[in-house]
Image (cartoon, grey):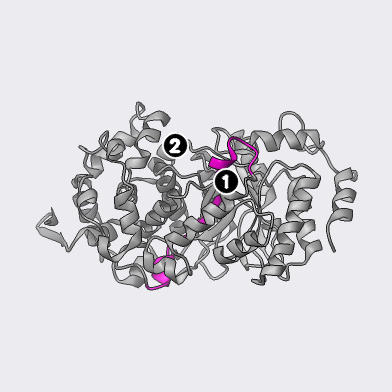
Amino acid sequence: MHLAHTVGDTIWSFADLKDLLAKASPLRSGDVLAGIAATSAEERVAARMCLAALPLSTFVDHAVIPYEDDDVTRLIVDRHDAGAFAEIGHLTVGDFRDWLLLPATDTAALTRIAPGVMPEMAAAVSKLMRNQDLIAVARKCTVVTVFRDTIGLPGRLSIRLQPNHPTDDPMGIALSMLDGLMYGAGDAVIGINPASDDVQALIRLWHALDEVRARFDIPTQTCVLTHVTSQIAAIEKGAPIDLVFQSVAGTQKANESFGVTLALLAEADDAARSLGRATVGDPASANVMYFETGQGSALSANAHHGVDQQTCEARAYAVARAFRPLLTNSVVGFIGPEYLYDGKQIVRAGLEDHFCGKLMGLPLGCDVCYTNHAEADSDDMDTLMTLLGTAGVTYLMGVPGADDVMLGYQSTSFHDALYLRSLLGLKRAPEFEAWLTKMGIADVGGRLIDASSRHPLLDDFSSRWPR
């Protein structure tokens, strides 16, 4: 396969498909660190022009990581829907971009082709798109999932209530949960990143979360974000687990660095499904998995095989897609400036991730975040959050004060969700919004009711949380 493009008097050649994809990527520190980024703006433009002329069918015939070396590649190839791909298979990458932006390419069309979009195709076309293109196309993608409420409906934004505590103190977690619920957050999931990995301590957290959820009949789901093996062990011990969580990446070697295989994920999916805890739709076919991803994870594990970090991220979405998750989100700026150096790179990465995930048929949310040593601040996060809101992001994080005291990074707050909903007229998941009205937390229009006087929920909540 000859990959080259002439700019002026210079012929730019690219060694193979993964080299072309890397050179066509917008500048980011991770690809520079890996030694695979374009060496100049001219080379980057040449790579994009070469990529634009490449037939989409090239990605069916040529894997960026060999089929025999990587189980994620095998998953991508073996599960590719040739029938869905047929609608777009005659296009080049550049033509695909144009087709996606056509007004006639609506939600129904994007839903039809999603099973035929390989992650490398999604990554490739994103590299040719401006930020506004990524937003415009992602907004047309609708992916709906269900467990105890319905997530991803058009015109709605869900929030993961994230009540982390550095010592897993039950009262500290309870207060953060109450804070979030009173601000109308939690319809995506109430999910804790635990400080401990002791299974018995984790089981106590699951029981505590479930006690509160059941006591107040909250139409949401709970999750303790520990390793998948601990969750399988907890299910065997009778823990009330709604969603099984796991961080995943886009190569077999990177997943192995997380202690994960595709077979293990399938085992966890079966275990969670066997509990039948979903209440919306058929429990047997409910969405029971929750995945997190992030650009740079494969590179940080030295498991990227020379593939650029954004293409690796899209491959992680193929892993998630195989298990029909309730939730998937990119923790976009969490790994650090070695991979996404500043606010500009974080904003671009967040829009790319959301676009690629939605295009592939995933319920894609985003942890709009940064670490304190990155060249970024809350203004950058306001920008990304607002852009994602206009793009129809499925859900965001709700962290007390936007400062996660357990994980030590900056995310989005309950107040940020109020801003975005007010600005864009977004509602919560319908079942959760009805519950807020029933509890007197919000009015029938979804607006929070003044809670300056003590709400009965406060006393009842605190008295029943285990100390």
Above or below, 189 relative to 428: below
Please give the range of residues in magenta: 278-302
Displayed quadrant of residue 114: top left
- Residue 372 point in image, percent of width and height: 58, 68
Would you say 250 lies left or right of 94 here? right
- Residue 358 point in image, percent of width and height: 44, 43
Q: Determine crowd level at label 2: few under 14, some 14-19, many 20+ residues with C-alpha closer than 10 A.
A: many
For residue 95, the mark is none
Residue at image position (84%, 42%) is 451
**Element on which disc 1 rests:** strand
Asked if residue 293 is among those painted magenta in the image, a careful observer would answer yes
> Tags 1 and 2 in contact by the CB under 8 Å rule?
no
- Is residue 296 visible from the viewing direction of this image? yes
The residue identified by callout 2 is: 141
- Residue 240 point in image, percent of width and height: 69, 54
Disc 1 from disc 2: Cα separation: 14 Å
For residue 395, the mark is 1
**Element on which disc 2 rests:** loop
Q: In which quarter of the image is the C terminus?
A: bottom right
Three-letter residue code for mark 2: Cys
Residue at image position (25%, 36%) is 86
Q: In which quarter of the image is the N terminus?
A: bottom left
Would you say 336 lies left or right of 455 here? left
Q: Which of 334 and 456 is in front in this view?
A: 456
Displayed quadrant of residue 402: bottom right
Would you say 300 lies left or right of 376 here? left
